Image: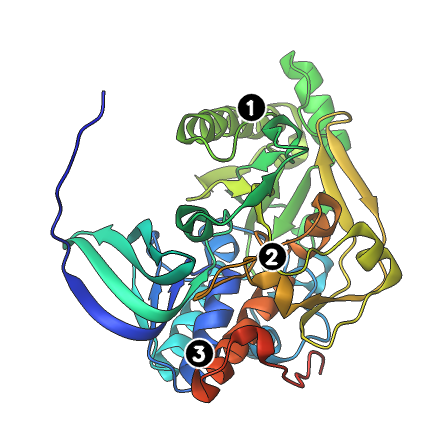
Amino acid sequence: MVINETLSTPVIGEYDAIVVGAGPAGCGAAIALGRSGMKTLLIEKHNCLGGAWTTGFMNPFFDHENKSGVVHELVSDLKAVDQFGGFRNISFNYEFMKYFLEQKMADAHVEVLYNTTFSRTLVEGNRVYGIVAENIGGRFAAVAKMVVDCTGDGNVAASAGCPFELGVDGDYKECQAMTLMFLVGNIPEKYKDGMMIYEKLNAAYQKGGKTIPFVLPVMIPVPNSHFGVVQFTHMYEYNPLSAKDITAAIVEGRSQLIDAFTFLKKYDEEFSELELISSAGMLGVRESRRIIGEYRLSLDDILSGAKFDDAVAIVTFNVDFHTKSNKGQHCYDVQPYNVPMRALIPKGYEGIVVAGRCISGSREAMASYRVTGDCAQMGENAGYYIAQALKQNKNIRDIRLDLQLTV
């Protein structure tokens, strides 16, 4: 059955740029656009900035070292209030991260709308000119000279008709595992810097009569506190583009975390005082759409340390596949390489840029550049590219900036 609708949607404003999704990539893009004098709207479906960093309880802050710009600023801000350190000396407090991002957004004069859900892309032919979204005020449209898709899943680009890749030849069952992070309190003082907890958790699972679903669990304390996040739950073979599958993955993840907490608290004396605080407000999806761009980062690029004249990020993080075959991780090293701006431009489309893990690349490349430090840097520098293209009234493909990627 199909319901035909005729809708009159009010346009709430005209912008230089609209950023959809306020995760690391979206925050970087919006801050850069605002600082460049662009009238910018940022919409976010949750009630804070930061995405995986904050709503997703993602720690640690991977691949932040030696990065310039917003990434460097955030680390400096967090260190100044003693809220950076802990596990591998690169973890942070979630509430302070939210606060500092909001301060930067306000200073850049970015208009932010929380609890606002993207609905569809406004497109004529191959040119994107705005979005339709919904919030407590109802359905609305906003138009812009450029739309930046920072949804992680490439939702805006896909709605516009941009082609994409998924999994292996379209098979979503090969996508990496999903994870629901969860917070625990009363972490023993001896583990204040974090620990790999496989041996303890596996022994507890055996006593509980179940098989552990992931063999590299980590307890990651928040600096200067007695609480932290557990990276453990792993849900395989769910379709990241299906609401039903995502729901089922969340339900399975919550069941896994209850088992993990219950068994560890019950069967390991060191953790007898452990407290369960909360599961994350968003599911950690490692892999979904990869938008086909003007350039596709390849495995050869990341192994050879490819450099580009339109570089927007420098990546040093290894390839990290969370595989179903061994219920663990398959990792191998890369040579430091650049992400080119062309990989952020959907092939054959105008008025739209993507940033974050949904950019154009192979599965192997995505398994390296998907971490938060890299997403934030590519988002920020994409913002500067967009601003220059608009100021010069040029196609963004013709812009070249001499960006300082490292400090």
Q: Are marks 1 and 2 in contact (CB under 8 Å)?
A: no
Question: What's the residue at 56%, 41% (across, down)?
Answer: 288
In-front residue for pair 282/166: 166
Q: Tell me if residue 90 comes above or below residue 7 in the rendering.
A: below
Which callout, 1 or 2, points to the residue nearer the camera? 2
Which mark is first along the chain, 3 or 1? 3
Which callout, 2 or 3, points to the residue nearer the camera? 2
Q: Position of residue 91 (x, y in %)?
A: 62, 60
Mark drawn on residue 33: 3
Q: Are marks 1 and 3 in contact (CB under 8 Å)?
A: no
What's the residue type where badge 3 is placed? Leu
* Quarter placement of the C terminus: bottom right
The answer to whether any part of residue 81 appears in the image is no
Which mark is first along the chain, 2 or 1? 1
Q: Position of residue 108 (x, y in %)?
A: 39, 82
Asked which secondary structure carries label 3, the reply is helix
Asked which secondary structure carries label 2, the reply is loop
Please tell me how crowded label 3 is: few (under 14), some (14-19), or many (20+) other residues with Cα within 10 Å.
many
The residue beneath circle 2 is: 293
* Colour scheme shown: rainbow
Could you say which quadrant of the image residue 200 lies in? Answer: top right
Which callout, 1 or 3, points to the residue nearer the camera? 3
What's the residue type where badge 2 is placed? Gly
Q: Position of residue 357 (x, y in %)?
A: 59, 53
Q: Are marks 2 and 3 in contact (CB under 8 Å)?
A: no
Could you say which quadrant of the image residue 129 lies in? Answer: bottom left
In-front residue for pair 51/339: 339
The residue beneath circle 1 is: 259
Task: Measure how far apart labels 1 and 2 are at the Cα level.
Answer: 42 Å
